Amino acid sequence: MTHSDAASQDELATPAARRMQFIEKYGVFAVVVLMCLILSALEPDIFPTTLNLTNILRQIAMNALLALGLYIVILTAGIDLSVGSIMALATMLLAMADTSGYFPWPVALLVGPLIGIACGMVNGLGLTVLRLPHPFIMTLGTLYTLRGITNLVSAGRPISGISPEVRFLGSGEIPLPFLGEYASVPVSAFVILICYFGVSYFLRKAAIGRHIVAVGGNPQAARVSGINVDRILLIVYSLSGFFAGLAALLMAGRTGAGFPNAGIGAELDAIAAVIIGGASFFGGRGTVLGVFAGVLVMGLLRNGLNLMDVSAFWQQTFIGMIVVGAVYIDVLRRKAGTAR
Amino acid sequence: MSRRTLTGFLAVAAVIATTSTSLAEDKYALIMSSLGSANPFWGAVAQGAVDKGKELGVDVAAVGPPGGETDVAGQIALVEDQIAKGVKGIAISPADTAALVPALEQARARGVAVIFVDKRADMPGTYIGTDNIPAARMGAAHICENVPEGSEVAILQGIITGTTGQHRAQGAREGLEACGMKIVAEQPADWDAAKAQSATENIMTANPNLKAIFSSNDGMALGAVEAVRNAGKLDDMFIVGFDGNPGAAVAIIAGDLEASVAQRPYQMGQIGIESLLALAKGDTIDENIDTGAVLVTKENAEEFK
């Protein structure tokens, strides 16, 4: 599940380097396991229960999708700040489409992801056609603009009454009667599973996926070898938009409503998860599995602090510290890598 | 992971552990729509709820979503996590009227009592908060006590399409009519100080004998003060605002503003927890519970600064 050049270089490397590579790939999972152990010790009656563990799955679903999209973007040394706003607009428009009575539910179901792709394409075009200097600029712009459009179309008010069919992916539950009366696994967890396996396969096996990885590793080399970098970037930002639209569909399902404040600040949680998961802002590094671990770290942190009724101030403080800590570990890792 | 890092993690965990409370007490939660003590109003509600919990021998957690007022997803997670914790009841100020409904319905389906504090969601349930009609009547009564009967008075309304604006305007009108005041103007100024200032200028031009102004919030009251001051009539104009903001308290101490009607957030927290316990025990409680209001005047303005 890794990417281009780093892996092939390391095949010839020393046992120390191999150990390094192992830590790079699975180190974040050690953090996940450690967090689970600490939380189980602190809240033995609450944390390891079926209800709480499935709650974590319900709570991380949106961030998992946003982070997956951002991972693809960050793989190319890009950034997409607009995913939270894309999610809000997509949630709102799909709620409007579904409750308007003009569209059958299968159409309403597609509205979220399609709006997401459209917004992502706008980001991609801003980057490749307008030649804006950095994706930060374009997506910062759409962060504001799309939030503004969301408020304009909704007049700042939520729309409830989304149909059960449209809500299924976000609110459906598969009962697990053998684990207790209320025990169930959210359908959204399977959506996440499929998306993560899909992207992992896509980046390794599909031609476009491999080109994305190549652009991430070295855009100049990719260009020279005949890859249409602009086309790849357009696809990358459309994919990020698509996952934000899919997150919107899950959010609409979970809440039964479209609401204008959906996804405020969500881009930051997603970026944090990707970085904790071992990706680099300079592109070309990280794995899908690592991103999922990063999402879990964020989810466990929030859940654990909630269970202990730790104030929101501390939650913000801890998340900030974990992001800095994770990136610092990454810095140390690279130093060790260059020293050898 | 080195041993030192592990020790560090465990130390942090131990500190957190000591802050969490015993399992013996029944657990209840106040889920705010803001960060809590970052906002003085919610800080007071939380304090009232926690104090009442101590008094009644239950454990009350006052929590808010890490993203603040707009963090709807964070608030839904809080509801789920409090259910997992096994709380008997949740008092909530929903961050969104629609989006919290499924999570709160789920809480009720699992036997957790749910009530609303200060804001309500689009679903049935008891609402605990300030009833703006009697609160505005209280402000009007203060005008009645200080201005001769039959005087010309004006009402500055908030955004009149919302219930808060409607209720405050209605309470003020009822109160002023009840004591025989002559209401010469009722104008919306949309909660806005600048609009209130121009509205007041126009009202004074049309009614030179105006003696008192009821303003539906403090911002508009301070706008009215500016208009009256510019007209040189501040000494014989009786102005009452609403909200008990720090800025209004300062104006009251300075003598520019006569009074302001303040909500009682501490009592809101206390009554919230009291009602939640009653509901969880199976008692029937009223659909609307008024937490009352208090008049801020020169005597007590220092506390509101």
Image: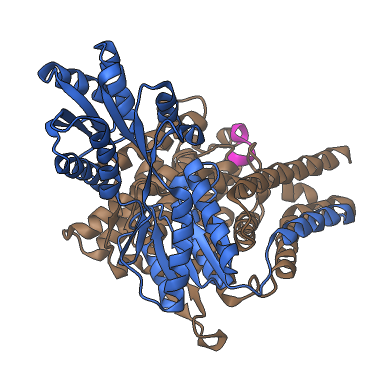
Chain colours: A brown, B blue
| A36 and B172: which is toward the camera | B172
Residue B162 drawn at (x, y percent): 23, 45
Above or below: residue B278 compared with residue B225? below
Identity of the residue drawn at 17% across and 40% down = B179
Tell me the chief SS of the magenta region.
helix
**B93 or B24, which is in the foreground?**
B24
Residue drawn 56% across and 33% down? A223
Where A5 falls versus B30 (above or below)? above
Q: In screen coordinates, is A166 left or right of A139?
A: left
Tell me if residue B108 can be seen.
yes
Q: Say left or right for B98 vs A283.
A: left
Q: Residue B251 appears at what percent x and percent y?
A: 40, 24
Q: Quadrant of the N terminus of chain B?
A: bottom right
Q: Looking at the picture, how far across and down is residue B181, in whole percent?
A: 15, 35
State the image coordinates of residue A266 (x, y, percent, origin top left). 50, 47
Please state which of residues A138 and A318 is positioned toward the viewer in this rendering. A318
The image quadrant of residue A31 is: bottom right
The reply to whether the magenta stretch includes residue B122 is no
Rendering quarter of residue B23: bottom right
| Residue at x 30% of width, y 66% of height | B287
Give the number of marks: 0
Judging depth in this view, the residue of A17 and B185 nearest the camera is: B185
Q: Is residue B171 above or below residue A2?
A: above
Q: Is residue B155 left or right of residue B281?
A: left
Taking B228 as reference, is A187 left or right?
right
Residue pictured at 42% horizontal, 67% vertical:
B114
- Identify the magenta region: A215-221
